[in-house]
Amino acid sequence: MSKLPVFTYQTRLRLTHEQTSCLDAYAALYGRAQRTLFARMRAGVPLNELKRSFLRRFGLTARQFNAIRVELEGKIASIRERRPELIEEAKWRIRKAEEAVGRLEEKKPGSNVVHQKKRRLAVLRAKLEALLADQESGRVRLCFGSRRLFRKQFALEENGYADHAAWKKDWQSERSSQFFVLGSKDETSGNQSCQAAVAPDGSLRLRLRLPNGLGSTSKHLVLEGVRLAYGQEEILQALSAGRVVTAQTKTGKLFRKREGAAVSYRFVRDRKGWRVFASVEAQPVALVTRRLAGAIGVDINPDHLALAETDRFGNLVGIRRIGLHLYGKSEEQAKARIGDACRQIARACAESGKPLVIERLDLRKRRAELEAVDGVRARSLSSFAYAKTISMLKAASFRAGVEVIEVDPAYTSVIGAVNHARRHGIGSHQGAAYAVARRGLGLSERPSVREAVVPTRNGGHVTFALPARNRAKHVWSFWADVRKGLKAAHAAHARSGGNRLPPAPLSPKSRALGATRALPAKPRHANRRQHCSADVLDDLPWQGNGCLWF
């Protein structure tokens, strides 16, 4: 099986009224067939028998039935694969919620906050029981049209519906708002049911095979002038690609056939009309990076991406902070900002010739944190798409020919704060990115100091002595003890009011051990934080201890 990623590109179609009606009818037939197929599969009917009956009942071609089956089997497989992770995540969140309820009952017994937390805990327990029951029985729950829209019928006025008929109209429209056209590499133009050709003006001409069940006078719907703002060259390259291979039949007879690139299409209707999504397997890209040059590590945070560049010996060369202010942004706006940041990082890696090192994050723990933090922090964490950032980093790096190294995230923040932050005059997040980059190169993670001086958010610091290291154990056991001491130091610092007071000066010994950050030249305005936006502040050229931004 190919390990190359599949990229999807989209564009909006310019259709006539007749073409729009034809696609609406196709989507309605496709939706009915898929829901019926799911019900029959749950009843245990053999797939071969289903295929014969569905071709006659719905007037489908064999290829159109395969598209319905493949999409449905993918949904079922994804639910079954995701279910164990949801069970573990629910257990994590229940544990965190129980701890939060216990703390609140000590501080605010009988308050409304405790009541709401207990309600949340009951919801999580009910969800866990349902997941465990489905896991035991092997049952798969699928709601065609989304559960969110389904539940809106129970609160019509709150969701802007005049009556149940208005909701039902939206419900039926949502359940029949898209259809999938499966492609194959051994078919003409990579797809038998939707064949694309290049027009003289460079646009695409889509020839869509319609189901016989629509009763249309024509078997095909031709869509002219299709242009993709992004991915047009990739689609044209996939259509022109092809090679002749030798295959063998079941009887042992050899024959030659032509193989190209498979192109699958998905037609989706939204409030503005119809869009088409074209998915094609990416072509291999030659690597332009090598580990002997060093590495660039990235530390992913809810409001920014911290980067650190090293040379081949693991010495710090440069740092950078890319702001990601996603709270209050729509999904498309957040994706656009994340995509811009990821392309910027991939371009920096390609120019320096160094691979990108990222953490292999456990998103279950990230989501479990929402149960035990305050509302502002919970909204910040929930509005940030960790999985989307990681996938976009990998996609941008693949296109740029940058190698991506994934490492275990254990104790990188602690190592960065204790070993690197004060020593190089950088922040804790840049120190974590530096630790990630060094781990990607397989370099040492031994403690570099005996007394930790860790910076705090208000510009101050906390100091604590590091525990003794047992060299018979793995170095991570030492960093586990350091993390406990660091948490205790931060807690004591907060209880003493250190986060609200002006930062205390460093001792002469600490100043000798670590470098201080050199501020840039003062801007034209007296108060730069008043006159500069957040994005401008992220790009100010901080310099410290010879570490320049790359």
Image (tube, rainbow, N blue to C red):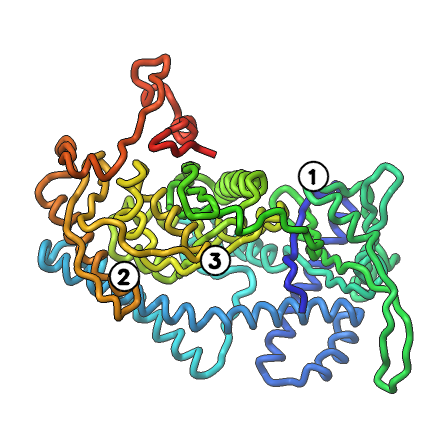
Q: Position of residue 168 (x, y in %)?
A: 54, 57
Q: Secondary structure at mark 1?
A: loop
- Label 2 residue SS: helix
Query: Residue 547 appears in which quarter of the rendering?
Result: top left
The x, y position of residue 422, in whole percent, is 26, 40
Alpha carbons under labels 3 and 2: distance apart: 35 Å
Q: Residue at x 24, y 62 (%)?
A: 478
User: Would you name the residue on which mark 1 appears?
Assistant: 229
Which mark is nearer the camera, 2 or 1? Answer: 1
Q: In the figure, residue 252 lies in which quadrant?
A: bottom right
Residue at the image position 21 percent from the left and 62 percent from the top? 469
Taking the spot 48% from the left edge, 60% from the top edge, the residue there is 150
Q: Give whichever of discs 1 and 3 has the lower sequence position.
A: 1
Whether label 1 touches label 3, CB < 8 Å: no
Q: CA distance from mark 2 to mark 1?
A: 45 Å
Q: Can see residue 153?
A: no
Q: Earlier in the sequence, mark 3 or mark 2?
A: 2
Name the residue that disc number 2 marks. 120
What is the x, y in percent for residue 340? 53, 38
Q: Estimate the x, y position of residue 234 in percent, counting from the top left.
A: 73, 47
Classify mark 3: helix, strand or loop: strand
The amino acid on which the numbered mark 1 sits, given as a three-letter code, is: Ala
What crowding class fits label 3: few (fewer than 14 Cα within 10 Å), some (14-19), or many (20 or more)? some
The amino acid marked with disc number 3 is Glu
- Compare residues 25 and 244 and report the one nearer the observer: 244
138 vs 464: above or below: below
**Numbered disc total:** 3
